[in-house]
Image (cartoon, grey):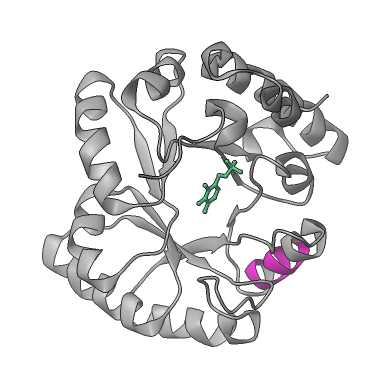
Amino acid sequence: MSQSSQNASLGKDAIDPAANLSAIKTEIEDALKEAGRPAESVVITAVSKQHDLERIRPVLNVGHRVFGENRVQEAMSKWPKLREEFSGIELRLIGPLQTNKVKEAVAFFDVIESIDRPKLAAALAKEMEKQSRRPRLLIQVNTGDEAQKAGVSPKDADAFLKECKKLGLDIEGLMCIPPVKDDPAPHFALLEKIAARNGLKKLSMGMSGDYLLAAQLGATHLRIGSAIFGPRPKKP
Ligand SMILES: *Cc1c(COP(=O)(O)O)cnc(C)c1O
């Protein structure tokens, strides 16, 4: 049984994020071995959105340091306290970024994964210059070309990367969220292909339902939320 389906059968009180993470790591190590990829080639981004500090701390206590949040405001309300308590935290913005939040995002995040349009790229370039702060950057690709989903269309990705380079942005990789109903494998493969032809090294792909597949298909960052922290509380 995969870690995610185990969690589905657990009650809220029974959730042990540190134990979940440990089991997931073992699964990923095995998947990587099978795929002939070195164990250290993949980093788990623990997606802590909508969870409170009490749920997040156990994972920090066992030494995990890489976390993903999808909203600037929420992250800024939770993480200053945790950054005081624990050193070496890497915070990754994995949700859509509005240009009016660029200032906060540049100041607060270590990595921004959701660059997807020229206006945002230009605003980031300007703000990074102004703050002399350089979060690492990924471009989000809308591999399924879904109307409601953020991300640059695969056919525009190469041109957008060139544009980012012109703006002085050093893009280190790509991120995608495949359509819920699709087999994710072709989406992961497409992301890998776009990254490879553009010389990009980082691939953020794979979530609770498909992280082993993503690990086998070349992901460097797996964004795992509910399989670690349990189901998210309902949004207010
Ligand atoms: C919430 C979220 C995740 C984690 O989803 P799970 O299915 O809970 O693992 C990953 N990536 C993004 C962009 C998210 O918003």
Please give the range of residues in magenta. Answer: 189-195
Instruction: Specify whether 212 is left or right of 103.
Output: right
Q: Quadrant of the C terminus?
A: top left
Q: Magenta stretch: residue 229 in it?
A: no
192 part of magenta stretch: yes
Quarter of the image where one finds residue 187: bottom right
Image side of residue 99 versus residue 162, left or right = left
User: From the viewer's perspective, is 30 left or right of 44?
Assistant: right
Name the spot of residue 214 as percent of width and height, x first.
73, 48
Q: What is the count of numbered marks?
A: 0
Asked if residue 233 can be seen in this view, the reply is yes
- In this view, the residue farthest toward the right is 34
Q: Main secondary structure of the magenta part?
A: helix
Q: Nearer the viewer, residue 205 or 131?
A: 205
Name the residue located 55 percent from the left edge and 74 percent from the top edge.
148
- Determine which quarter of the picture holds residue 127: bottom left
When the figure is inspected, residue 114 is found, relative to residue 167, above or below; the finding is above
Q: Is residue 121 above or below residue 1?
A: below
Q: The N terminus appears in which quarter of the rendering?
A: top right
Say which quarter of the image contains residue 96.
bottom left
Work out whether residue 128 can be spotted.
no
Question: Above or below — where is 140 with respect to 27?
Answer: below
> Which x, y percent locates residue 179?
69, 64
Which residue lies most toward the left here? 130
Q: List x then y, in percent, for residue 72.
A: 29, 52
The image position of residue 52, as x and y in percent, is 35, 28
Question: Residue at 25% across / 76% down in the picture?
Answer: 123
